[in-house]
Amino acid sequence: MRIEKYRIEEHNQAGMAAQQRAFEYLSGEIKNVPEILQQLIAFQVGIPSWALGTGGTRFGRFPGGGEPRNLEEKIEDIGLIHQLNQSSGAISLHIPWDIPSNPAHIKAMAAQHGLRFDAMNSNTFQDQPGQKWSYKFGSLQHVNKDIRKQAIEHNIEVIRHGIELGSDALTVWLSDGSCFPGQLNFRHAFQNTLEGLQEIYAALPDHWKIFVEYKAAEPNFYSTTVGDWGQSLLYANKLGPKAYTLVDLGHHLPNANIEQIVALLLMEGKLGGFHFNDSKYGDDDLTVGSIKPYQLFLIFNELVEGMDARGMNHTTDLGWMIDASHNVKDPLEDLLQSVEAIMITYAQALLVDRKKLLAAQQNNDVVTAQEILQQAFRTDVRSLVAAARIQAGGALNPLALYRAEKVREHLIRERGAKTMATGL
Amino acid sequence: MRIEKYRIEEHNQAGMAAQQRAFEYLSGEIKNVPEILQQLIAFQVGIPSWALGTGGTRFGRFPGGGEPRNLEEKIEDIGLIHQLNQSSGAISLHIPWDIPSNPAHIKAMAAQHGLRFDAMNSNTFQDQPGQKWSYKFGSLQHVNKDIRKQAIEHNIEVIRHGIELGSDALTVWLSDGSCFPGQLNFRHAFQNTLEGLQEIYAALPDHWKIFVEYKAAEPNFYSTTVGDWGQSLLYANKLGPKAYTLVDLGHHLPNANIEQIVALLLMEGKLGGFHFNDSKYGDDDLTVGSIKPYQLFLIFNELVEGMDARGMNHTTDLGWMIDASHNVKDPLEDLLQSVEAIMITYAQALLVDRKKLLAAQQNNDVVTAQEILQQAFRTDVRSLVAAARIQAGGALNPLALYRAEKVREHLIRERGAKTMATGL
Amino acid sequence: MRIEKYRIEEHNQAGMAAQQRAFEYLSGEIKNVPEILQQLIAFQVGIPSWALGTGGTRFGRFPGGGEPRNLEEKIEDIGLIHQLNQSSGAISLHIPWDIPSNPAHIKAMAAQHGLRFDAMNSNTFQDQPGQKWSYKFGSLQHVNKDIRKQAIEHNIEVIRHGIELGSDALTVWLSDGSCFPGQLNFRHAFQNTLEGLQEIYAALPDHWKIFVEYKAAEPNFYSTTVGDWGQSLLYANKLGPKAYTLVDLGHHLPNANIEQIVALLLMEGKLGGFHFNDSKYGDDDLTVGSIKPYQLFLIFNELVEGMDARGMNHTTDLGWMIDASHNVKDPLEDLLQSVEAIMITYAQALLVDRKKLLAAQQNNDVVTAQEILQQAFRTDVRSLVAAARIQAGGALNPLALYRAEKVREHLIRERGAKTMATGL
Amino acid sequence: MRIEKYRIEEHNQAGMAAQQRAFEYLSGEIKNVPEILQQLIAFQVGIPSWALGTGGTRFGRFPGGGEPRNLEEKIEDIGLIHQLNQSSGAISLHIPWDIPSNPAHIKAMAAQHGLRFDAMNSNTFQDQPGQKWSYKFGSLQHVNKDIRKQAIEHNIEVIRHGIELGSDALTVWLSDGSCFPGQLNFRHAFQNTLEGLQEIYAALPDHWKIFVEYKAAEPNFYSTTVGDWGQSLLYANKLGPKAYTLVDLGHHLPNANIEQIVALLLMEGKLGGFHFNDSKYGDDDLTVGSIKPYQLFLIFNELVEGMDARGMNHTTDLGWMIDASHNVKDPLEDLLQSVEAIMITYAQALLVDRKKLLAAQQNNDVVTAQEILQQAFRTDVRSLVAAARIQAGGALNPLALYRAEKVREHLIRERGAKTMATGL
């Protein structure tokens, strides 16, 4: 489904007076507005193909309706999100859920929606029908060489699909680990995994990156073989310059200081990308910014500072992706909320007065350092984000327009009330 | 499947010399051996009908084979466990997964296996095919009265099934809660839930109990409407004398002191029962005693102390049940390990010298208090547990005999390699 | 030290243009501005007398200078804070650190600074010189009746001091608990504590309240005898209508949903008061709002909703106090930041559109419910808070004026660089 | 104080019959008894000089009596422990608390007690009287080069003291970090710290090691500059072959899998040593094995496996030290309990049937792998540990003899009831 351009314009027109008031007020208070607008327009967040349907837990799943039935419909859904917010111009595919039967067609279709293909995701945490070997006891870590080989080949196949689509990165999230003490020899598991990653690494095209994602627990409940940033960095360093760590916000032990991890990975030149979401208890995969928005701000604060210190391009030098699950919300609405939270937070991070902050740090003026961060975070930048979006051709209020256009009702009529997208 | 009695005897005979050595040594070191043996023989742990198949996570499920295809086969499986360890003489059913079409037959069949029916479990955390209203946004907490009514009626139906089978308790675990701030009015949710529980309570036969189970998180990831023991106790107190709190070991926030909770609930006369399992990160539902065996001992230490202080019967005055999930183990083997861990720990708790402990506490002799507990915990009581089991007609080493008899292979031949038991 | 009134006026004048711009913009966007201003002006946060000096940890303490040397100087310091922000019109004393030798004089002096005496705090977690019995193994929980009696009498003495000063509440925080399994009989410890609290309760004047504070851990590292809200509520219910639970934000297990606890305590009519601070790992006692400002907002959201539902007075019906420790900041600056964070958050909570929120909840419109909360939280209300403050006679920017006036330098000159306030 | 040799013999004689029964029974059940006895006899745990007095928290300290007043008395205390258990033959000093005025004398005195000098500990987390620069805002991380230099020089001074005493390792625990977001530039803090460590590293004698200890939080409550094993390993790798990571059991985030960390550090050849203690909530510094004895066993299981895989000497290739705090126990009794827990656990880890475990792992036989570990952990090895101790000249039951000899009473008479050892 596409929204007619004039409908967007009408919507924008209706809210423009209030937007102008807010934007003008804010423009009087902050510096570098044009530059920030350009940075906001450039910033794009990848949408995962598996987040377009209703998610669930081991206790059940309560599907909504109108979920995309195939890759084409997934691209349409992301295209719609991007049409509304102009900040979601990338799609992150998951193999085997999204194997394109006709890659050229899919690529062209995505391009029509203004979408490029972000990191490809492999899956060795589930068994697929017809699969020879089971991943019940892991994939790259497995004691059985045949199973490791199968997992390696799957990842190489994912790279091949990615090449055809113009992607340039592979995200490897391994659920490998153990549920009980004694189940694994940790060292052997690490070494098997490393060897597998090395074979996959060898199959990467020159300009590709591989992202080694870590996670503290789930689905294994005693150990995970890529369990924290320290382990991921060990793998990445042993693999070589194309290997990076990927940070998923929900994959940490309680109370972890994620922003410090981000700063150190950037320092080491080994931060590859992000999976955005939010959580209170574990890998809850909630809407970005819905639980701990200040933590998100502190992370972006480190990202901006650290990328600038290395002369990195904010938009293209890291992989920015959402990885959320939508159990009680319309997935598209949830994604609109998530991207909005990211844009707001990025804008706030751009407002931080870095010179003053550094000066406060140099003076151990902790009070002022806190004030500087809070000054940025307490600033209401929503009109700034909206201005960028409108300038890029998007909607003043994507969520409001989505509802006004009755998109979900339309999708249900078109696709049915009981469709079920592939994914978790 | 039943194991021939002579096979058990042969197995016991083969290991009897070592068992005798161990038992004789231990008998010389501890007091009250005959009394402890009687207590161990009397102690029975309920097996949940949903734990006989392979469990899984939202990321997948890796089934084994030979899983029970119906309630009869579930009873057979538990009967086999009980035959081996003589400590699993109860079954805890889950409705609608285990609705008995012919209750009298089921009851008789269970009796043949020496099994009684422990607490019945209702399910308002999933939608069943053909169900009128969805529990997507809760059941007893729901803003819609019709949905609350449907959930109440389901619970009353579960009581009816339980009456037919001779059960005398209902466990209500509600997944009700919210995933996002703002989703719920906490007060309204509590009050709706209370009203629903009151209607269910009113339908309880005189000699029945209702167990209100609490859980910190999952499947809701922001709030749970019966979230901790404090909330459960509030409900139980408002409901009346037949209402109790049920403690599941995996349902707490990190670092919670569960043994203190147990002691206080016993003090208040409001501890109803237990769901045993173990965990490292959350509600991991791992084998009992596999991660934190000393915590389990400290809990049993409070149970024994607190029950004795109230003159309660160890065996019958609380509901003892396992609630675990078996993702990487043969479910029956896992259950054998879990029951063994419980029996060992109960035996150790019985060894605690309570007079000396009280004296040490009265003197603030913290060192001696610790020594007394560790003295019990460090004692190898396996031969004691085995002696009780053999005396009751069970196997010296249930797990070893289970494997020697190739039970799983037999079940796979009988039931097929791809059966899938109802459950999580 | 007092700041000359004209200095405040000059300071306000200098920033007034920007303030007016912000306030006028905001006034155009929100409703009920005059009413909210009145609520903000009325709202007062108690400052603890022990938070005026540099705090520390078991690893050390790095004092600043100019700390108050006696109760008079503490009142001066709080008077100064209140002069600047007009929102700190109460002082919470700690006995024995702040025993007033001349209560009438102290009371008059406080009144001159516009301060009233908030809840009194007793101390049975330390041994004082000359004290007969040691609290090494607890106070009200103690196995020795003489020690319990000493602790009871101390609390009654604190009430007497409070009466003389015009306070009307006693906060009892007990560090009682245990460091090792076996050290305590949990039930006896609870019952001893209850009996002690009952004797203290009996000594309360009619219009007084007693606040039973809970804490998960520290200084005891295995159990705490008032360890969570469930335990505190048990005590409060057994004590009677003058007993309430006090919530300290840092006293919970990881990931606890504090806002739900607040809502339920209000529902039960048993929430008595608050100790504000912030934390990342444990009872870190950091500046309010410095780590999890959205959690603070969600708590205030429940407070406003729950108090309104019971027709409670926002200002007077709960005890609002800060309980923080300032290890690396000037304590007065830290307190100014904390009160500012509280006022901002309270203002945001007042902005929540409760009708719309209830409607969204009634429709299970989770997306809209989240939007409503975020709408309030993302609003920059600093100019609103400042307007209220200016209207009440305070400074536009208390922290900036504090620094411009070189208050700390002045205090160091007056009191010395090596003074050390009583407290932690 | 020394205990007369004949008193030890009398004590041993009195309990020998029971010990013999237990040992003979156990010897019949396990293999390699003589070899295990030799390993137990060889194994020595370093005692920290700061753990001989009563510890405390920021809330207070409740001293006992008879605490050592100087380094000589500390050596006497450790000598006594070692005399009793023959497993505490090393002392870990802390500078400046333990600066030896006459190193040759101290060294000789230690030798008389059979003690060698384990890792030296520096202190840049407190300010000492007369110190030029303050560590309020860190030491090696500090923005001020002079302060970094002061901290570097202190560490080099500690090395010098260590050389004189025959130590061969330096433990650097930095409390450096921040209490608030914005306070630190994480990257600069890391780099300053690295440069400081590099200078200290350059001052190490050839055969020395430097241990970089990590800690998640406290005394800084927002970030720590050596916060987890990943950070410590980064430093250690950048420093060179003499730099290692030191693991303190209480320095992790909730739920961390410490045994996996240990295995990976051993794999990398970068595990340097251990600080043993136990905890429930944070860095509680409780008696080893008093809270999570199975976790301790799993750690030792990895240690034995990993050291054997690298051909390392169990006794000499890692630094084994206790780091506990004794708030409610007699420190010497606490240390006796801690060392006993370590010896028991080490013995159990030596019992693990590694061949069978590896075979189970190769077959993904999770049930058997668990059984093998539990088989070792459930074995009562106390008589084995006692046999080794007696063989080495120690006491059958060190704690019982310590009490029977009224050591504490003796020390109080000798040193006074109000002495206070340097330390935390």
Image (spheres, coloured by chain):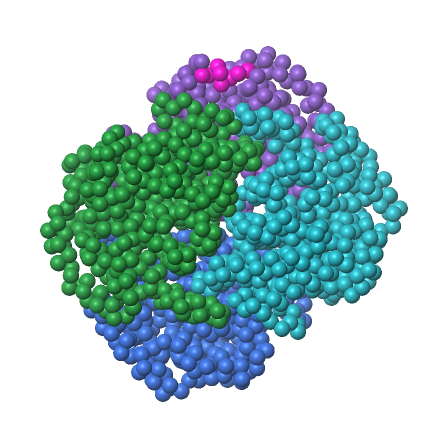
Chain colours: A green, B purple, C blue, D cyan
Residue placed at 31% from the left, 38% from the top? A93
Q: Is residue A273 left or right of residue B380?
A: left
Residue placed at 77% from the left, 40% from the top? D41
- Tell me, yes or no, if residue D135 can be seen here: no
In this view, the residue in front, B424 or A419, is A419
Residue B163 within the segment the image draws in magenta: no
- Residue C133, quarter of picture: bottom right
Q: Quadrant of the C terminus of chain B?
A: top left
- Residue D157, quarter of picture: bottom right
Residue B408 within the segment the image draws in magenta: yes
Residue placed at 52% from the left, 58% from the top? D190
Residue A366: where, in percent of width, then height? 47, 68
Looking at the image, how many numbered discs can be counted on the residues?
0
Residues shaded magenta: B405-412
Farthest residue in the front direction? Answer: A206
Residue D335: where, in percent of width, then height? 71, 51
In this view, the residue in front, B355 or D65, is D65
Residue placed at 74% from the left, 29% from the top? D32
- Tell me, yes or no, if residue A83 can be seen here: yes
Residue B169: where, in percent of width, then height? 43, 34
